[in-house]
Image (cartoon, rainbow, N blue to C red):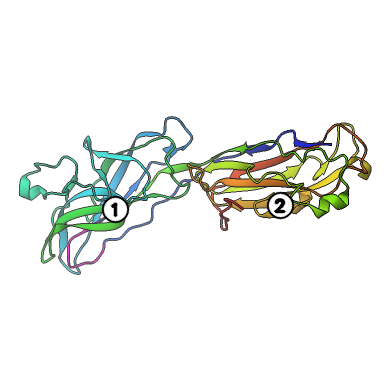
């Protein structure tokens, strides 16, 4: 008798869109000039990492907020570039037709100068802004960034893209200027709405116990490794967010043959499945598990699946094939208060 899964199903049944809201910002009180920033994608713009088109040239307004002194001091002018940390996803950001984002350690000497020092010369490749005098607003007018995200970029659903600023600035009314490029970590949060979605598939061979017609239950239980399927079989998941997992056996973790009765113990053979670190022997035993995002490269989404025979076939009704179908369903979720790193369990 042989056990094969006639089909091991991995389905992504739902997707959700995260609409992250920017945090409210207030001007920092400081004795030296400086800025913070926020950039929020319009609610209508979403990014699906599985779409072949990616995110093409979305307009994202950047709002700068200047430091102010306790009484009269204000940041007057700023020149800046956006720095992408080595851990940040690949993307391109342009302003006035020039790229203004640089990878860590590759800013090519930018920012170079303030507007008042060079009359705007050499501004290509950086962002410059004059806030005006004491009586002007502490926030800038919207600076329209053009953001492009290639397909397959590993953006996390519900998480903003966090970038750094590197700036120089001038202060007035007693506020000190900053002439050496200064890093503001996490100063820009681009809230691109990322679809929480996933792809999943089964990677491996049929879960086959081989010929067990002469094997007694005593012999099977005495040699579990002999009657356990290969550890190389797994479900592979790529996801931009967390996901729920459910597992169900068509025959409630019993093998039977076509026309066999599940209520007749002579026509069924019990087995268990090990998945996500849990040994499962019945449909009521698994429930729903929540896994942390697998990422777009799938490195955190390798989920091994093994099956172990619990009875022999020698006392069972003879038949060519005893089989069952295991269905494993993956559902992306918007948020998860508690999620497990499921890779390799």
Q: How crowded is mark 2: few (under 14 residues within 10 Å), some or many (20 or more)?
A: few
Q: Position of residue 83 (x, y in %)?
A: 27, 49
**Is residue 197 at all visible to an observer of this figure?**
yes
Name the residue that disc number 2 marks. Answer: 287
> Image point 58% across, 52% down: which residue?
342
Q: What stretch is highlighted in magenta?
A: 28-35
Corner quadrant of residue 204: top right
**Is residue 136 at all visible to an observer of this figure?**
no
Image: 285 above or below 252:
below
Which secondary structure lies at badge 2? loop
Q: Where is residue 122 in the image (x, y as percent from the top left)?
A: 11, 42
Q: Is the magenta stretch mostly helix, strand or loop?
A: loop
Compute the Cα span from label 2 to label 1. 42 Å
Q: Which of marks 2 and 1 is nearer the N terminus?
A: 1
Name the residue that disc number 1 marks. Answer: 164
Q: Where is residue 144 in the image (x, y as percent from the top left)?
A: 27, 40
137 relative position to 312: left or right: left
Quarter that holds the N terminus: top right
């Amino acid at each position: 008798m042989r056990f094969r899964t006639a089909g091991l199903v991995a389905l992504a049944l739902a997707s959700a869109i995260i609409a992250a809201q920017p945090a409210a910002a207030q001007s920092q009180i400081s004795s030296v000039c400086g800025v913070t920033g926020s950039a929020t994608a319009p609610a209508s713009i979403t990014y699906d990492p599985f779409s072949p088109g990616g995110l093409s040239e979305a307009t994202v307004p950047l709002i700068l907020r200047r430091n102010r002194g306790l009484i009269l001091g204000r940041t007057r002018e700023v020149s800046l570039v956006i720095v992408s940390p080595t851990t940040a996803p690949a993307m391109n950001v342009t302003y006035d037709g020039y790229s203004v984002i640089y990878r860590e350690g590759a800013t090519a000497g930018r920012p170079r100068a303030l507007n008042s020092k060079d009359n705007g010369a050499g501004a290509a490749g950086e962002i410059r802004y004059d806030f005006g005098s004491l009586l002007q607003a502490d926030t800038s007018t919207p600076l329209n960034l053009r953001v492009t995200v290639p397909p397959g970029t590993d953006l996390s659903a519900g998480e903003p893209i966090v970038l750094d600023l590197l700036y120089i600035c001038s202060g007035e009314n007693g506020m000190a200027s900053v002439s050496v490029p200064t890093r503001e970590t996490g100063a820009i949060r681009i809230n691109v709405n990322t679809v929480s979605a996933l792809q999943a598939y089964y990677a491996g061979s049929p879960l086959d116990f081989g010929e067990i017609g002469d094997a007694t239950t005593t012999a099977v239980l005495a040699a579990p490794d002999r009657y356990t399927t290969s550890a190389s079989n797994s479900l592979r998941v790529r996801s931009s967010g967390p996901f729920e997992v459910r597992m169900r056996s068509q025959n409630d973790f019993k093998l039977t043959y076509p026309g066999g009765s599940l209520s007749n113990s002579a026509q069924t053979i019990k087995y268990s499945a090990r998945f996500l670190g849990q040994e499962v022997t019945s449909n009521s035993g698994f429930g729903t598990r929540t896994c942390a995002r697998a990422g777009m490269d799938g490195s955190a989404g390798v989920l091994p699946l093994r099956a172990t025979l619990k009875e022999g076939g020698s006392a069972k009704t003879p038949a060519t094939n005893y089989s069952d179908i295991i269905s494993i369903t993956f559902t992306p979720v918007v948020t998860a208060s508690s999620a497990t790193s499921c890779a390799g369990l």
